[in-house]
Amino acid sequence: MEYRVKQLSVIVITNNSEKNIDLTLSSIVCQQEVDDIECVVVDQGSLDDTLKIVESYKDRVNLKIIKYKSDKFSLMNKAIREASGVYISLLDSGSCFASQSSVYDALSYFDKDKCHAVYIGTEAIDSKIFAECRLNYQDFMVKREVYLKYPFNTSYAQAAYYDFLLKCFSIKEFKFINIYSNLISPSILNAEEQFKFEIESLMILSKYAKDDCIRRNNYYINLAKEETVRQKSRIRELISLNRERNNELKAIKLTSEYKLGLFLFNFLKVFGIRVSRQKGR
C-alpha cells in the first residue's frame, strides 16, 4: 500500500501475544467507511508467533512494526512519536473495537464537536474481571498533537495515564464526547502493582489539587519510587494490612483511593503532617 498521512493510528503493544493479537488486528481491518487507518505494532521481543501473525496483515492494513523493549508508557511515547495519524487510539493486544463502525463514529465526533479527545467507552470482554477495570488509555481516542505536547510521565510505573488525563482536565485541553465502541481485555495488576498504582494515584491527585500533604512526605515518595528489596518487603506488609482494613470497612462502599487514604491516615500523623477529615467521612 502507498504510504501517506493517516487519519487514525491504532497503537498495539505486544509481548508473546499469539493467542489474542488476531482478535485485535481483525477488528481494525474490518472498520467500515474509514480507509486511512494505520496500525502501529510495538513488539517487546515476542518469542512465539506474534510477529508472524502481525505480518500476515501487511496487505490488509497500513502496518508499521516497531521492535523495542522498555516500560509500557515509554513504549507508548515512542509509538506515538513514530505514528503518522492525526488521531491516536491505544489498544492492548486482546482488546478490540466493538463494532465495524467504531472508528467512524468516534472520528465523526471530532469533526462535529471540534474536540481534542473522545471518550469512547469500554466494556470488559470477560465480565468476571470487569470490576478490575480502571479508566485507562483504551477508553479514549486523542489527537496526536495532544499526546506529543503532554507525553506520559514515565516516572509513574502504573498511573502515568491517570496523570495525563488530570493534566489535560486541569488545563481544559479536553472536550469529551461519550460513545461506546471498545471491548477490552484488561490487564490485571498483581498486588504490588495495584498498591503502587494507588500510591501513585494519591500523589498525582495531590499534585493537581495543589496539596503538598502527600507530595512532601518522604514515606509516600519512597513508596512511589522504584522498589528496593527492602521496599518490596514493606509494600507486601502494607498490602496485608490494607486487606485487613478493607475487611473492616467492607460494609461501606468506598473508592479504592479513599480506602487506601484511610489506611495511610496514621502514617501521615507519624510524620507530623496535619490532616483533617471532612465531616461525614
Image (spheres, grey):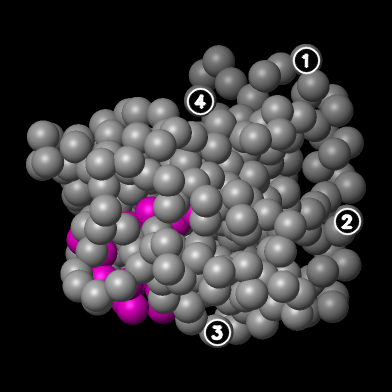
Residue bearing the label numbered 3: 68
First in residue order: circle 2 vs circle 1: 2
Which mark lies nearer to you, 1 or 4? 1
Q: Looking at the image, can residue 16 be seen?
A: yes
Which stretch did the figure color magenta?
A: 73-91
- Where residue 24 sits: x, y (%)? 55, 52
- Where residue 71 sits: x, y (%)? 59, 75
Q: Secondary structure at mark 4?
A: loop
Q: Secondary structure at mark 2?
A: helix
First in residue order: circle 2 vs circle 4: 2
As rendered, which of 190 and 229 lies closer to the eye? 190
Q: CA distance from mark 2 to mark 4?
A: 28 Å
- The answer to whether the residue labelled 2 contacts the one labelled 4, judged by CB atoms less than 8 Å apart, is no
As rendered, which of 224 and 41 lies closer to the eye? 41
Instruction: Tell me which amino acid carries mark 2.
Output: Glu
Which mark lies nearer to you, 1 or 3? 3
Instruction: Tell me which amino acid carries mark 4.
Output: Gln
Residue bearing the label numbered 2: 237
Q: Which residue lies at the image location 58% right of the left edge and 81% below the top edge? A: 70
Quarter occupied by the C terminus: top right
As rendered, which of 74 and 236 lies closer to the eye? 74
- Where residue 235 sits: x, y (%)? 80, 60
Q: Which residue lies at the image location 17% right of the left edge and 42% below the top edge? A: 110
- Where residue 268 sits: x, y (%)? 64, 51
Which mark lies nearer to you, 2 or 3? 3
Instruction: Tell me which amino acid carries mark 3.
Output: Tyr
Q: Which residue lies at the image location 84% right of the left edge and 25% below the top edge? A: 248
